[in-house]
Image (cartoon, rainbow, N blue to C red):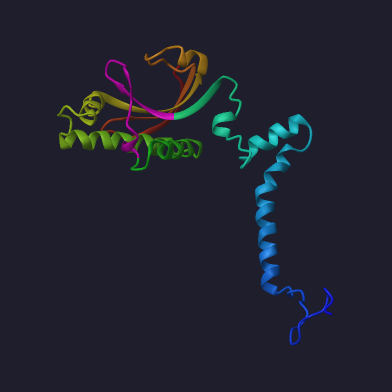
Amino acid sequence: MITPHSHSPGTKPETAVPVTARDLWALAGYTAFAGVLLAPLRHYVGKPKQVRRAKFKHDSFPLSTYPMFSTDRKGRIIVPHVVGLTAEGERIFLHHRHYGTGGLNQVRKQIARGVRGGHAAAIAQRYADSLAAERQEGRVNGSSAGAIRRRREAAVVSVLVVRSRFIFADYFSAGEHSILPKEETVRARCVVGGTAELVEEPTA
């Protein structure tokens, strides 16, 4: 009679598979990966004030509170940017391609970094030179959106690099009509075809 625990002749008892170095490396990798995923939870430990400060300082992926959407801007924002002025004093927002071939957000960040670094005059010069070159090439005719924009920009006589402070409630309540910023400081000025100069004067 064969008991349940007996083995057939010629077979060996089952033994545990030994742990290899490869298994240990895999376990370490899984542990590190889990640690990366759970690391943002550290931003949610502590007092509420500390939690808010920590989670806005860094993007808290995967419990994301993206600062570009969720940061409390207190109803206002300060934007370094470039505007063109016509002989009549009309403000024209110049196309970002006068400064670089990247997208709008990329150029906007470059301009903001340049203004903070004290290079506002170089930014104004670059825009003014681009406008002057475009006029010399005569690329202002046509009915496309680009041609319409270039006709508007053809009336610009000077370029300003400014640091503007906008109030959200005022700006968005204006509908489709452009409004002036609440406060604005001119950092550089350049006449189209001329040489840029650094300035520091309020305009509004």
Q: Nearer the viewer, residue 192 or 50?
A: 50
> Which residue does the image show at 15% across and 29% down from the upper left?
142
Q: Position of residue 110 (x, y in %)?
A: 44, 40
Query: Which residues, given as a range, are shown in magenta?
Result: 81-99
Q: Nearer the viewer, residue 196 or 164?
A: 164
Q: Nearer the viewer, residue 184 or 151?
A: 151
Using residue 173 as the reference point, say whether residue 149 is left or right of it: left
From this view, report whether residue 165 is shown above or below residue 35: above
User: Percent x, y for residue 150?
Assistant: 23, 29
Left or right: residue 156 versus residue 65 is left
Q: How many marks overall?
A: 0
Is residue 96 covered in magenta?
Answer: yes
Task: Return the residue nearer the eye: 75 or 155.
Answer: 75
Against 105, residue 74 (above or below) is above
Residue projecting furthest to the bottom = 10
Residue furthest to the front: 1
Instruction: Give percent across and percent down for residue 90.
Output: 31, 17
Residue 129, magenta (yes or no): no
In which image quadrant can residue 72 be found? top right
Q: Residue at x 69, y 47 (%)?
A: 39
- Residue drawn at point x = 36 percent, y = 34 percent: 124
Q: Position of residue 43 (x, y in %)?
A: 71, 39
Q: Name the image quarter holding the N terminus.
A: bottom right
